[in-house]
Image (cartoon, rainbow, N blue to C red):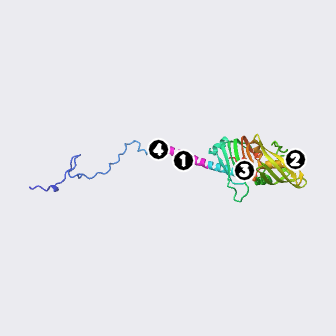
């Protein structure tokens, strides 16, 4: 009997672990192994546990972000509110745009502690576009603390220039600190302020740099309004500013001492509010159209009495948090 061709021989299953030489499997490809069922009474498969640590971490991060966003919003709001109020108040006094800078310490901390490390005020020295008179002021107050009726500065330095035209405007607007009912004597001591009691209206002020004097043209109301002229000399003695009357006349007649003193009171109070009485004058230079000044002081109080009313309704001492 002839042997059948090799290719026609029936295939026989091979023992486990043996494979045909041509690499083909001797049995159909097996599928995935069947899922084993747990024994009766055994607990079923448990769902995968969530990473509780990750959830707690994400929740904490979200909470921190909310707090940070709220803090940043409050910081920006409070800083803008106080600077805007202060810039408006100082702008009403100086007659020009004024910038106010506060310490970078967080505003909520400053409010909670009642202390501001520093407070900087700077006017725009380029002048007003309409050419109106304005004051130049550059000042810094350090260690500022809140008070019931205002605030105080542990130390203060300031310098600037004050045009006489601005003094005239302030005096006629009732923006000066007030004429003193008791008068301001030639030593610079002042009494209680009372602007409404002043019979003097300043019309014009001219300075003489060479003589260091200031000539004031004003109207004094007694029974009638009388034009008067007074020449005064501002002097600094031990850091205190005072004004001495050199000459005063009404038409061709001399003026009584109390009337001449009223002119001095109105001039001094319109130039510098009462807070300057507590400051040390380092400089006062007379120019033809104004004066240059520089001052410093310690433990300076700012409130309604020391700053006086302004031409507007905003006061820097009321611009709190």
Magenta highlight: main SS: helix
Across and down, in percent, residue 277 comes to 77, 43
Q: Earlier in the sequence, mark 2 or mark 4?
A: 4
Give me the C-alpha separation between circle 2 and circle 4. 89 Å
Give me the C-alpha separation between circle 1 and circle 2. 73 Å
Outermost residue toward the bottom in this view = 130
Question: Which residue in the structure is indicated by mark 4?
Answer: 51
Give me the C-alpha separation between circle 4 and circle 1. 17 Å
Left or right position of 320 against 221: left
Contact? badges 4 and 1 (CB < 8 Å): no
Question: Which residue in the structure is indicated by mark 2?
Answer: 258
Contact? badges 4 and 3 (CB < 8 Å): no
Q: State the residue in front, 8 or 57.
A: 57
Please say whether residue 112 is visible from this viewpoint: yes
Question: Which residue in the structure is indicated by mark 3?
Answer: 161
Q: What element does badge 2 sit on? A: helix
Give me the C-alpha separation between circle 3 and circle 2. 29 Å
Left or right position of 317 against 261: left
Q: Residues within 10 Å of mark 4 (few under 14, many from 20)?
A: few
Label placed on residue 176:
none
């Amino acid at each position: 009997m002839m042997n059948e061709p090799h290719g026609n021989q029936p295939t026989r299953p091979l023992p486990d672990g043996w494979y045909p030489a041509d690499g083909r499997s001797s049995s159909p490809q097996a599928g995935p192994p069947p899922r084993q069922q747990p024994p009766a009474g055994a607990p079923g498969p448990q769902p995968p546990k969530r990473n509780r640590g990750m959830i707690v971490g994400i929740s904490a991060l979200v909470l921190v972000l909310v707090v940070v966003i709220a803090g940043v919003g409050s910081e920006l709001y409070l800083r803008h509110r106080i600077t805007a109020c202060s810039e408006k108040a100082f702008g009403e006094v100086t007659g020009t745009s004024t910038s106010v800078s506060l310490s970078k310490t967080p505003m909520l901390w400053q409010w909670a502690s009642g202390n501001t490390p520093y407070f900087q005020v700077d006017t725009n020295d380029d002048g007003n576009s309409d050419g109106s008179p304005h004051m130049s002021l550059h000042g810094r107050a350090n260690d500022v603390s809140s008070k019931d009726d205002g605030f105080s500065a542990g130390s203060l330095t300031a310098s600037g220039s004050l045009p006489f035209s601005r003094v005239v405007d302030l005096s006629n607007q009732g923006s000066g600190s007030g004429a003193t009912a008791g008068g301001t004597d030639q030593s610079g001591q002042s009494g209680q302020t009372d602007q409404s009691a002043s019979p003097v209206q300043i019309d014009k002020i001219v300075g003489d740099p060479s003589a260091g004097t200031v000539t004031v043209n004003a109207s004094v109301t007694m029974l009638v309004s009388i034009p008067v002229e007074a020449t005064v000399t501002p002097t600094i003695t031990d850091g205190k500013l005072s004004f001495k009357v050199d000459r005063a006349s009404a038409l061709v007649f001399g003026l009584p001492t109390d009337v001449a003193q009223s002119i001095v009171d109105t001039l001094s109070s319109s130039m510098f509010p009462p807070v300057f009485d507590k400051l040390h004058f380092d400089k006062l230079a007379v120019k033809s159209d104004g004066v240059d000044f520089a001052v410093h002081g310690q433990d300076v109080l700012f409130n309604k009495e020391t700053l006086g009313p302004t031409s507007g309704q905003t006061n820097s001492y009321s611009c709190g948090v």
